[in-house]
Image: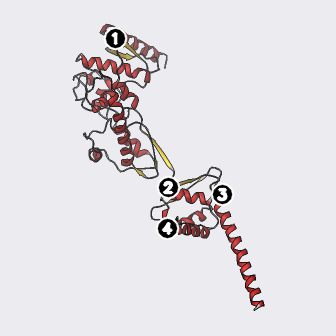
């Protein structure tokens, strides 16, 4: 029995050594950095991909050295069935265990899309469809259906999507991005509307969007927005027509050629604030939070007119009387002619 016991002891010792080596190798595999370039690497897991194929794909790209060990770890840890589909960015220094945590947490690579303040519906949809990582599904005719799905009280998209930068994984649909932007606009309105000034010239959050969209199109200068809103508020109070060019341009539609003529100003449309009083029926652009706040907090004063200065800084000259305004317009036209002659 002694030789047998001795042999058994040798076998047990050998198994212990082999197990220890295996555990050491396994631990080293899990806690060593995967093989990616200094700038990192991307790896995509398609929906429904079995984990065996995931591990093989990592090995084929040279990211890991032993797909079998990864499969064993994933199954023993229970993580094999918790891997999320998507595109992942693997940072240099990421360990194999860290990579598995990334896969199971769904920490996918995110792309960004910015809705620019002042865009209209055509510009917004065109930009969405030009983004290489956005799945273009929407057509112009589908705006009303999308807005009905969102619970909007209008089928008109202008003003309902907040200018902001949105982040999303690859192949996100344009509808998903728009839903994010709509919800964020509703959040902003719910925050800003209760804080409105008592003399705000709007009767509802939607009217605030209408006025804000006009302010947004009239100036990109934050320091002028409340002042311009104040001009419009006083004109509305005095039942003066707003006479703002951006509404006329919007009424012409996407075919506007960039040249606003006197005939355009005389041609009546629902958006021509030279021929019609009050606010136009809908917003004319996507206003940002600053423009919304300006519409709800118009600056006090007596100014009823403004015109661009032509100084190249986007500033305007504000006037209290028509005579002062006419002089400011004449000065603007003189400066414009002078700049043309100088080739500016």
- Which sits earlier in the primary sequence, circle 3 or circle 1? 3
> Taking 54 as reference, is 329 above or below it?
above
Q: Is residue 4 left or right of residue 242?
A: right
Question: Mark 1: few, some, or many residues within 10 Å (few <14, many ≥20)?
Answer: some
List the residue tagged with mark 1.
325
Tell me the residue that label 2 is attached to.
106
In the displayed orientation, state which residue is furthest to the top.
323
- Residue 339 is situated, as x and y percent measured from the top left of the image, at 46, 16
In the image, taking residue 41 as reference, residue 185 lies left or right, namely left
Outermost residue on the front side: it is: 1
Sequence-first tag of 2 and 3:
3
Chain-order first, disc 3 or disc 4: 3
Crowding at mark 2 (Cα within 10 Å: few <14, some 14-19, many 20+): some
**Residues at circles 2 and 3 in contact by the CB criterion of under 8 Å:** no
Q: Is residue 191 visible?
A: yes
Q: Which residue is disc 3 drawn over?
A: 33
From the image, state whether disc 4 or disc 2 is nearer to you: 2
Residue at mark 4: 50
Q: Are marks 2 and 1 in contact (CB under 8 Å)?
A: no
Q: CA distance from mark 3 to mark 1?
A: 69 Å
Disc 4 from disc 2: Cα separation: 16 Å
Q: Position of residue 111 (x, y in %)?
A: 49, 47
Going from the N terminus, do you reach mark 4 or mark 2 first?
Answer: 4
Q: Nearer the viewer, residue 331 or 42?
A: 42
Q: CA distance from mark 1 to mark 4?
A: 71 Å
Q: CA distance from mark 3 to mark 4?
A: 24 Å
């Amino acid at each position: 029995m002694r030789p047998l016991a001795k042999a058994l002891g040798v076998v047990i010792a050998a198994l212990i050594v082999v197990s220890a080596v295996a555990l050491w190798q396994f631990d080293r595999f899990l806690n060593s950095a995967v093989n990616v370039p200094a700038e990192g690497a991307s790896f995509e897991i398609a929906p429904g991909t079995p984990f065996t194929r995931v591990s093989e794909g990592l090995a084929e790209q040279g990211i890991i050295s032993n797909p079998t060990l990864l499969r064993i770890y994933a199954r023993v840890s229970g993580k094999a069935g918790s891997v999320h589909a998507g595109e992942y960015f693997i940072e240099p220094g990421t360990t194999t265990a860290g990579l598995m945590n990334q896969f199971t947490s769904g920490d996918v690579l995110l792309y960004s899309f910015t809705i620019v303040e002042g865009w209209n519906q055509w510009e917004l949809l065109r930009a969405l469809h030009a983004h290489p990582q956005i799945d273009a599904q929407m057509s112009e005719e589908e705006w009303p259906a999308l807005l009905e799905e969102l619970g909007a009280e209008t089928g008109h998209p202008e003003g309902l999507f907040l200018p902001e930068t949105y982040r999303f994984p690859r192949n996100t649909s344009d509808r998903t991005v728009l839903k994010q932007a709509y919800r964020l606009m509703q959040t902003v309105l719910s925050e800003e509307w209760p804080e409105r000034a008592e003399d705000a010239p709007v009767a509802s959050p939607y009217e605030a969007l209408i006025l804000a969209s006009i302010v947004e199109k009239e100036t990109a200068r934050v320091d002028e927005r409340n002042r311009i809103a104040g001009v419009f508020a006083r004109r509305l109070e005095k039942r003066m027509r707003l006479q703002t060019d951006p509404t006329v341009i919007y009424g012409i539609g996407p075919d506007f050629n960039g040249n606003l003529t006197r005939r355009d100003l005389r041609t009546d449309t629902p958006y021509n604030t030279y021929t019609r009083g009050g606010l136009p029926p809908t917003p004319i652009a996507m206003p940002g939070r600053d423009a919304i706040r300006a519409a709800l907090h118009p600056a006090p004063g007596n100014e009823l007119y403004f015109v661009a200065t032509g100084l190249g800084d986007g500033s305007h000259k504000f006037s209290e009387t028509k005579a002062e305004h006419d002089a400011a317009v004449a000065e603007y036209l003189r400066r414009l002619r002078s700049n043309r002659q100088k080739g500016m």
